[in-house]
Image (cartoon, rainbow, N blue to C red):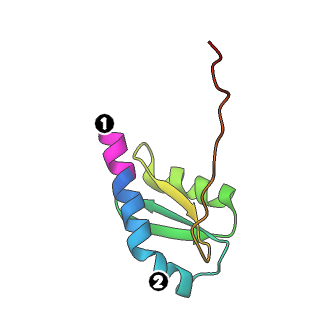
Amino acid sequence: MIQMADNQTNRAAYEAQLPVLRQRYPLGHFAVFAGAELLGTYPTYGQALREGYQCAGQADFFVKQITSKEETQHVVTPLAVA
């Protein structure tokens, strides 16, 4: 459960800093958070992920794209038929 708590902390830090991220960095870049701290922003998801692994090592880190508004992704799973 420690991992889940760390991830929630990183997400909360992202959400708290989102207005500043939108002003300071280009929309579309990816922000990387670890230990509730911004590690940096990167133009591609791959670069952000690589930096997260390099800086955070085995610790949890959080990568999220900076957009003008929050977008929800829906995942639909097949229903079990009884």
Name the residue at 39% across, 46% down: 59
- The amino acid at mark 2 is Val
| Residue drawn where x is 36% and y is 53% of the image | 8
Q: Quadrant of the N terminus?
A: top left
The answer to whether 41 appears left or right of 10 in the picture is: right
Label 2 crowd (10 A; few <14 / some 14-19 / many >=20): few
What is the count of numbered marks?
2
Left or right: 50 as drawn, with respect to 2 = right
Q: Which residue is mark 2?
A: 20
Give the alpha-carbon distance from disc 1 to disc 2, as whole Å: 30 Å
Relative height, residue 2 to residue 45 (above, below): above
Front-lying residue, 35 or 75: 75
Q: Residue furthest bottom?
A: 23
Q: Which mark is residue 1?
A: 1
Query: Which portion, as a residue range, is magenta?
Result: 1-7
Label 2: element kind: helix
Q: Position of residue 60 (x, y in %)?
A: 42, 47
Residue 50 at x, y percent in the picture: 60, 53
Residue 72, numbered label = none
